[in-house]
Amino acid sequence: MARALRAEGVDVIFTLCGGHIIDIYDGCLDEGIRIVDVRHEQVAAHAADGYARVTGKPGVAVVTAGPGTTDAMTGVANAFRAESPMLLIGGQGSTDQHRMGSLQDLPHVDMLRPITKFAASVPTTTRVADMVSMAFRECYLGAPGPSYLEIPRDVLDGRVPLGSAFVPEAGHYRASTRSLGDPDNIERLADILVHARRPCILLGQQVWTARACDQAASLCRTADLPAFMNGAGRGTLPPGDPHHFQLARRYAFDRADVIVIVGTPFDFRLGYGKRLPNTATVVQIDMDYRTVGRNRDVSLGLVGDPSAILEAVEQALSGRLTATPTTRREWLAELRAEETRLQEARLGSLMSDARPIHPMRLAHELNQFLTDDTIYIGDGGDVVTTAGQVVQPHRPGQWMDPGPLGTLGVGIGFAMAAKLARPDREVLCYFGDGAFSLTGWDFETMIRFNLPFIGVIGNNSYMNQIRFGQIARFGRERGEVGNKLGDVAYGRFAEILGGYGEEVRDPQEIRPALERARASGKPSLINVWVDPDEFASGTVNQTMYK
């Protein structure tokens, strides 16, 4: 098992111990694979997901049978919707106890199959290594995703001569996935862009997954394409780049004659495609054939690796855009004017000195605090929605959020993975208080493994995104049922566990507190008390349900 993991480039596993899996630890020690043990299996799965997102290599979580595996399922489901390549390895009772009621026996494979790209049980000890490689290959079929491998106790206990077991050799059992798709469609897209007068492009998760950020940025500059970014696509263009836009997306979509969507499905985030007007030529580029044209017809669909496709399109455009620069620059100037108008309209909220603190002011302070080396993580409902309107990572690969499953509690696992994978980078995680409370005990794991990060909690003592909808539907008397949380001083919680903590109630104290957390060199929690009656615009409009 450990040799197969090492052949895949795995250098760390995230785990919570159990009698069904302890032999794997022994193998990992032999192979020099680091073992990071957490306090909850959900965190192990989120960390494996996060490690894959940061490094581009598959993350691995190892959990015991029964409740160990079911605890991890939320993290696997989140990786499935977010197209993140991770492997969950789960224990199982011995095969000679099959269906006898052994300890923690459950039909794990049947349970995991709907939320993975591959789920199987290892039948014999000789098959362990090649089934590990099989699971990893399946992770990269089309758009990436998670796999699950169950190993019965007697299979893991078994011994075979090393020469009789197939252990894949690193670099010799993978084919290239960098496919262009149909070359004719590259030319068609180039022709569409040549004749477009008001084009725009949306760069999504797969731009980072495929490490296509350089190609995407180059195409935007070559073709004068205004670019909007979502998910891990954020940071493809740096703040201040003339082709970087954040707020004017609806305005651009409503007026564009060509809209190119890269690596983002037509799911709720795009109104199932209804936010793209029928008057526009819509082009969709995706790694998964099943995603193209789902929920909305497209004018042109390209299936393949975004980095290869975008690079080929730029090459096909070479020397063909000389007739359109004036029109394209006028379109960019129009969008920049709208972007500026929207920015100015919200300055009052961004600079608000109100107490309790306005959530937009907190998001603004976080954005101003970011450096070129800061990996930003969002974990929550309203806090992620608000930050998405304000926070601008400086480089590719420096934005992490739950993704389309909307899972709360990813933050600690993501921060753990990010700091392990990139110890030279600063990690800043912005939690909602509801989100932090789900997995927050693994703050202690960050301390135990000496993984300093800056944690910020936007604390309004509610599950606020849900609270707004309840109040709107049922009135305030019934609208605060089931979503009120206690007033927890999370800064003190951090100190109790051995980290750095502060409580902040004055907006003027946000930046100094962040600076002190940075200087502490410890895992930290800055607990910022925000106004519970200020909501993100997406929450007010209930866009996630439309």
Image (spheres, rainbow, N blue to C red):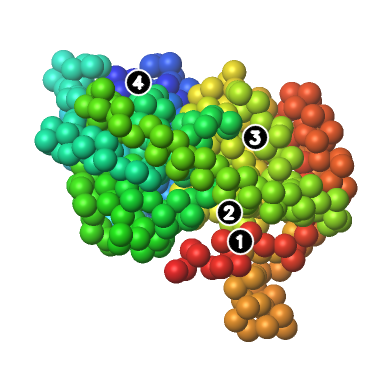
Is residue 455 in view from this perspective? yes
- Left or right of 38 in this view: 317: left
Mark-to-mark CA distance, 3 and 1: 24 Å
Residue 79 disc label: none
The quarter in which the C terminus is drawn is bottom left
User: Considering only order in the chain, which callout, 3 or 4, is on the residue closer to the N terminus?
Assistant: 4
For the residue labelled by badge 4, is the local secondary structure a helix, a strand or a loop? loop
**Residue type, numbered disc 4:** Gly
Picture coordinates of residue 474, whole percent (x, y): 63, 84
Graded by Cα atoms within 10 Å as few (under 14), some (14 to 19) or many (20 or more), the crowding at tag 1 reads few
Label 2 or label 3, whichever lies nearer to me, is: 2
Residue 9 disc label: 4
Residue pointed to by mark 3:
428
User: Considering only order in the chain, which callout, 3 or 2, is on the residue closer to the N terminus?
Assistant: 2
Out of 46 and 531, give the one closest to the viewer: 531
For the residue labelled by badge 2, is the local secondary structure a helix, a strand or a loop? helix
Which residue: 21% across, 37% down?
191
Disc 1 and disc 4 in contact, CB within 8 angstroms: no
Mark-to-mark CA distance, 4 and 3: 27 Å
